Image (cartoon, rainbow, N blue to C red):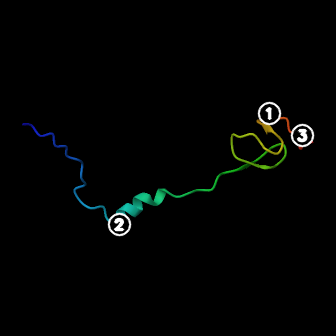
């Protein structure tokens, strides 16, 4: 009778608290970057349509009645 025993990868040594924490230093949250809309000056995230005036790359993409 043949046994199918699977062995799993087990670390040779325990990872110390300092080593684990140093590895996790890059897991932090960063604030979203914003730019100013060239037409109206509103804060806009890069590569997105301006919600205030409805323009993207100098062209009107969304017709916005409140901008007028």
Q: Is 33 rendered above or below residue 54?
A: below
Among all residues in the image, which is located at the extreme right? 68
Q: Is residue 21 left or right of residue 29?
A: left
The residue that appears at 71% across and 40% down in the rendered structure is 48
Of mark 3 and mark 2, the one earlier in the sequence is 2
In three-dimensional space, the C-alpha distance between marks 1 and 3, rounded to whole angstroms, equals 13 Å
Q: Which residue is mark 1?
A: 61
| Mark 2 crowd level (few <14, some 14–19, many ≥20, 10 Å Cα) | few
Residue 65 got which mark? 3
Report the quarter where the N terminus lies: top left
| Mark 3 crowd level (few <14, some 14–19, many ≥20, 10 Å Cα) | few
Q: Is residue 31 left or right of residue 59?
A: left
| Residue 47 x %, y % | 69, 40
> Front-most of 35 and 13?
13
Q: What is the total number of numbered labels drawn onto the structure image?
A: 3
In three-dimensional space, the C-alpha distance between marks 1 and 2, rounded to whole angstroms, equals 52 Å
């Amino acid at each position: 009778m043949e046994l199918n025993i699977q062995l799993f990868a087990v670390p040779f040594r325990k990872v110390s608290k300092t080593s684990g924490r140093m590895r996790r230093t890059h897991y932090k949250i960063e604030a979203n970057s914003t730019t100013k809309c060239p037409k109206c000056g509103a804060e806009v995230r890069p590569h997105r349509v301006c919600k205030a005036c409805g323009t993207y790359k100098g062209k009107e993409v969304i017709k916005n009645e409140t901008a007028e």
